[in-house]
Image (spheres, grey):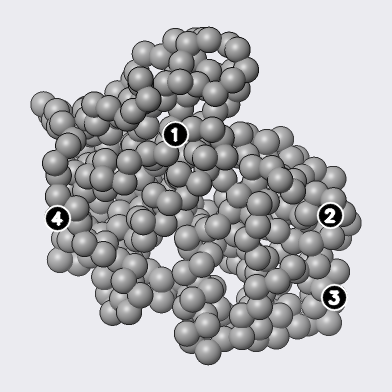
């Protein structure tokens, strides 16, 4: 993909960078933010004043609709640095399309493509020093939209802010991930907002995930809300199951996020000759595979989590351990993905996007 030149975004740079205050070898995910951020207002029926300004607190009315009705959507992306110091994004067109799909569902006006790409190009190149090279290091990019109209009537806001902040990160999950299969709580329902990155989708998972954490698990794998019979996605990741040598994952629909890492893994696996089945995955099938030894892997895929192997799952109070594989799909496709992201391999798909 090629970069779009900067025509609209006004830039006001920091006087002094805060980068020397950050310990890059001990980063906590999403706790430090780079020097600049992007802000654009929606007012009088149009997006206006796209600006890059020093990262910092903002003043927003306590009556802004986002605080009352959660009218907010977000995206997760990363910028990577190769060994020659060049910065890259990964499939940013997908994030742009998805934030507008999320916005549409929450009655938020679509953002402008030219502003989005100009903002990303300019921000990432301004704060390029915040991207460290090396596997797992990245600048996590968080675009989001919030409803800023003052007023607590339950109706769509007429004013919004589109903001992008960026945070230097390492791996999201350190070590193994253990998951609980949801048997009572649900993340999303038919016709709902599960396919969007609506802020509330994540808040709704915090309580059940806390219960899972109390039992020593990191995540919940959500099942369909009707019967809790089919495996859908984990809180911050889509999920894959390897039964024998076949890779299974649930199809996207109005309950499941159309993950960029998910669709990239499907493509990489198919092109590597792996049999990939995108279909409903019954819990019973995975339990049976765990019992008869054909369940070789479960892994999650997401921008923050990249590809995270799941070492155990719990269902009906029983814990199923997944034995470690020597040549795991998780390791293989994580490497293939990161080789493209970090510009170490050919990119036959055109997924890599150069930042000037
Ligand atoms: C991402 O992977 O970018 C996500 O949005 C997950 C996030 C909640 C950490």
- Judging by the rendered image, the residue that carries numbered circle 3 is 288
Camera-near label (3 vs 1) is 1
- Judging by the rendered image, the residue that carries numbered circle 2 is 228
Between the residue at mark 3 and the residue at mark 1, the CA separation in whole angstroms equals 46 Å
Q: Quadrant of residue 187?
A: top right
Q: Earlier in the sequence, mark 1 or mark 2?
A: 1
Q: Earlier in the sequence, mark 2 or mark 4?
A: 2
Horizontal and vertical percent position of residue 352: 30, 66
Q: Quadrant of the N terminus?
A: bottom left
- Judging by the rendered image, the residue that carries numbered circle 1 is 109
Q: Residues within 10 Å of mark 2 (few under 14, many from 20)?
A: some
284 or 174, nearer to the observer: 284
Q: Could you tell me which secondary element the residue under label 4 belongs to?
A: loop
Q: In the drawing, does residue 353 fall left or right of residue 188?
A: left
- Judging by the rendered image, the residue that carries numbered circle 4 is 356
**Residue 8, visible in the rendered structure:** yes
Establish if 7 lies above or below 260: above
Please identify the residue farthest to the front as the structure is shown.
45
140 or 252, nearer to the observer: 252
Q: Earlier in the sequence, mark 3 or mark 4?
A: 3
Q: In the drawing, does residue 276 fall left or right of residue 10?
A: right
């Amino acid at each position: 993909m090629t970069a779009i030149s900067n025509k609209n975004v006004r830039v006001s740079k920091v006087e002094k960078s805060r980068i020397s205050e950050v310990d890059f070898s001990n980063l906590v995910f999403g706790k430090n933010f780079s020097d600049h951020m992007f802000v654009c207002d929606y007012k009088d029926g149009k997006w206006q004043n796209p600006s890059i300004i020093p990262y910092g607190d903002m003043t927003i009315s306590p009556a802004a609709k986002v605080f009352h009705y959660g009218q907010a959507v977000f995206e997760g992306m990363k910028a990577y640095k190769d060994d020659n110091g060049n910065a890259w994004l990964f499939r940013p067109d997908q994030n742009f399309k998805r934030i507008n799909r999320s916005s549409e569902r929450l009655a938020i006006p679509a953002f402008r493509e030219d502003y989005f790409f100009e903002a990303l190009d300019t921000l990432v190149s301004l704060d390029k020093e915040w991207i460290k090279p090396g596997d797992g290091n990245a600048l996590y990019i968080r675009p989001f939209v919030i409803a800023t109209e003052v007023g607590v009537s339950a109706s769509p806001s007429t004013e919004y802010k589109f903001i992008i902040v960026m945070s230097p990160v390492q791996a999201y999950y350190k070590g193994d991930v253990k998951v609980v299969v949801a048997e009572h709580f649900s993340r999303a329902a038919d016709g709902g907002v599960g396919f969007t990155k609506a802020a509330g989708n994540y808040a709704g998972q915090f309580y059940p995930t806390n219960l899972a954490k109390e039992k020593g698990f990191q995540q919940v794998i959500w099942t369909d809300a009707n019967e809790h019979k089919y495996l859908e996605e984990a809180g911050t990741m889509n999920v894959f199951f390897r039964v024998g040598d076949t890779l299974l994952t649930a199809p996207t629909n109005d309950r499941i996020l159309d993950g960029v890492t998910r669709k990239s893994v499907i493509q990489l696996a198919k092109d590597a000759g792996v049999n990939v089945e995108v279909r409903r995955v019954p819990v019973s099938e995975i339990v049976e595979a765990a019992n008869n030894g054909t369940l070789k892997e479960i892994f999650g895929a997401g921008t923050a989590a990249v590809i995270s192997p799941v070492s155990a799952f719990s269902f009906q109070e029983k814990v199923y351990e997944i034995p470690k594989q020597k040549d795991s799909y998780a390791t293989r496709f994580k490497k293939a993905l990161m080789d493209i992201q970090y510009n170490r391999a050919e990119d036959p798909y055109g997924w890599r996007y150069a930042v000037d």
